[in-house]
Image (cartoon, rainbow, N blue to C red):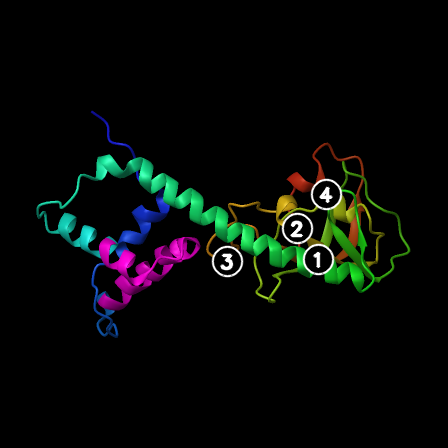
Amino acid sequence: MKKKLLPLAIVGALSLVGCSKTKEPKTEEEKAMYSVGVMFGSRLNQLQLTDEELDSLSQGLRDSAKNEKQKVDPMQYQQKIQDIFKDRMAKQAGDVKKKGQEFLDKFVAEGATKTASGLAYKHVKEGTGPSPKETDTVKVHYHGTLMDGTVFDSRGWTEGVQLMKVGGTTKFVIPSDLAYGDTGAPPKIKGGDTLVFEVELISISQGQEAPAAQAPAKKK
């Protein structure tokens, strides 16, 4: 009989909570295990777990790792686990999206333009060259951040670059529905996060078969 898999975040985060006591890692092995915990523990941010819940998670890890008697049958709580993840992630995404909408509205109030899809943009420097089409491949220089200025990796913006001209620089505020949605891209991008890009359109390669969004943007 095959067991159902726990959500990935819990599987990874179990390595975070092997000890309920807080201590400074000293040996190289302790530092390595602590680093694993930091990497996987970030996946639990959206759950906003209480200290009591973290203690329960830690106890379950210890019992299983030491092959001790389990205090509950995990298989009976698969649906409960799924419900907790779904409800709490949705709640946090809703809170983040509300802040994102306020951020976007302020951007528009300061002179930016909002498109029908919800994308907002402001030309920092007007270009004098042509504008790309959806089927063109573009070469850009970009700087992408969260609302608080945290830098993250790039994402395609098919609609946005079509509003630009070669030689121009534009600031885009992209709501979560046009970015990573309620799921986000942990650990840097939470569910519901609004993204901010400043993009310089350097050149256009016309007549490409692949849409710009499917081809990775090249840094200059």
Mark toward the viewer: 2 or 4: 2
- The residue pinned by badge 2 equals 175
Dot 1 and dot 4 residues touching (CB under 8 Å)? no
Mark toward the viewer: 2 or 3: 2
Dot 1 and dot 2 residues touching (CB under 8 Å)? yes
- The residue pinned by badge 3 equals 188
Q: Earlier in the sequence, mark 1 or mark 4?
A: 1
Between the residue at mark 2 and the residue at mark 3, the CA separation in whole angstroms equals 16 Å
So how many labels did they put on this image? 4
Q: Residue furthest right?
A: 128
Between the residue at mark 1 and the residue at mark 4, the CA separation in whole angstroms equals 19 Å
Dot 3 and dot 4 residues touching (CB under 8 Å)? no
**Which picture quadrant has residue 116?**
top right
Residue 206 drawn above or below residue 35? above
Q: Nearer the viewer, residue 87 or 151?
A: 87
Specify start and end residues of the magenta stretch as a single range: 30-56
- The residue pinned by badge 1 equals 104
- The residue pinned by badge 4 equals 158
Q: Nearer the viewer, residue 198 or 43?
A: 43
Q: Residue at x 37, y 45 (%)?
A: 84
Q: Residue at x 21, y 69 (%)?
A: 21
Q: Earlier in the sequence, mark 1 or mark 3?
A: 1
Q: Residue at x 75, y 48 (%)?
A: 160
**Which picture quadrant has residue 19?**
bottom left
Q: Residues within 10 Å of mark 2 (few under 14, many from 20)?
A: many
Q: Residue furthest top?
A: 1
Q: Earlier in the sequence, mark 1 or mark 2?
A: 1
Q: Secondary structure at mark 1?
A: helix
Q: Secondary structure at mark 4?
A: helix
Between the residue at mark 2 and the residue at mark 4, the CA separation in whole angstroms equals 14 Å
